[in-house]
Amino acid sequence: MKPTKNLHELEARLDKLNSSEGLALIADLFPGKATFSTSLGQEDQVITQLIAQGEMDIKIFSLDTGRLFPETLDLVARTESKYDLKIQMYYPNTESVENLVSSNGINGFYDSVENRKSCCFVRKVEPLKRALAGNEVWITGLRAEQSANRSDMKRIEWDEGNQIIKYNPLLDWTFDEMIAYIKENSIPYNPLHDKGFISIGCAPCTRAILPGEDARAGRWWWEESKKECGLHSK
């Protein structure tokens, strides 16, 4: 199914707006059909604050893989309380997790890239598809600065794999701009960020980065890959 709106026309309109105005436009054009996936990272916390501040008609969801840091789960509760909103949690299929662990072991993702991607599929990709079902726009916290393979992404694009329009309102934000906004607006964030964890995913697959390392270096650090889990494949 192709997008129902002209993406070129929509992109031109969004290019004239800041992130908050862009989100408001998406909410207005796609009432009840826009959803935001938050991993509770700093970028996502900014978007959650913008949605809450503007009282926008945008649903918010997150994927609980079953292997998240306690600090991440605690942040879900703190965010819901601060902004008086609900973050819908999606979980992996129990039988699929049981089969995965039975086949590859509890930490089999360390053994090969194939095993790791299988784990990501069961715990993240499949639940994401359920979360996106019935929506027309998927809002993400992707920034072009995060990694080389995200630098060529557009502010708004058609996600063929998920058959949905993807909107990246913070695509052009720098890390420093994001941190300044978080401080200025007292946005709650994961305390692990203050310990060198820049990009935070599942606990067994995330480490703090060293000075000078790429922001995504702490994700799946034991392998040579594009440092993606499959959520944002086109």
Image: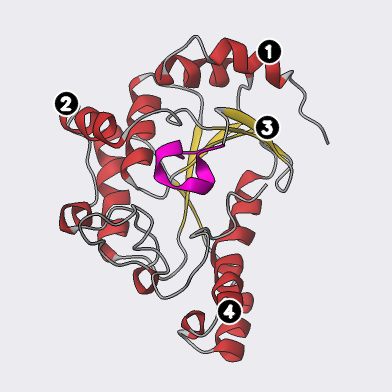
Q: Is residue 143 visible?
A: no
User: Viewer-proximal residue, 174 or 74?
Assistant: 174
Please check the rendered image and state whether residue 217 is part of the magenta-colored stretch, yes or no.
Answer: no
Taking the image as shown, residue 96 lies to the left or right of residue 190, namely: right
Give the residue type at disc 2.
Glu
In percent of width and height, residue 64 lies at 45, 61
Given this view, does label 3 or label 1 mark the residue nearer the observer? Answer: 1
Q: Do the residues labelled 4 and 2 touch (CB within 8 Å)?
A: no
| CB atoms of marks 3 and 2 within 8 Å | no
Circle 1 packing at 10 Å, graded few (<14), some (14-19), many (20+), is: few
Dot 4 or dot 2: first in sequence order is 4
3 or 2: tag closer to the N-terminus: 3
Q: In the rendered image, which quarter contains the N terminus?
A: top right
Q: Which mark is residue 9?
A: 1
At label 4, the amino acid type is Asn
Residue carrying label 3 = 136
Q: How far apart are marks 4 and 2 (CA)?
A: 42 Å
For marks 2 and 1, the one nearer the N-term is 1
Task: Name which of mark 3 and mark 1 comes first in the sequence.
Answer: 1
41 over 105 or under it: above or below? above
Q: Where is residue 212 in the image (x, y as percent from the top left)?
A: 24, 54
| Measured Cα–Cα span from mark 3 to mark 4 | 31 Å
Which residue position holds label 2?
184
Q: Which residue is drawn at 41% across and 75% down?
A: 222
First to last magenta residue range: 140-152
Residue 85, located in which quarter of the rendered image?
top left
The circle drawn on residue 115 is: 4
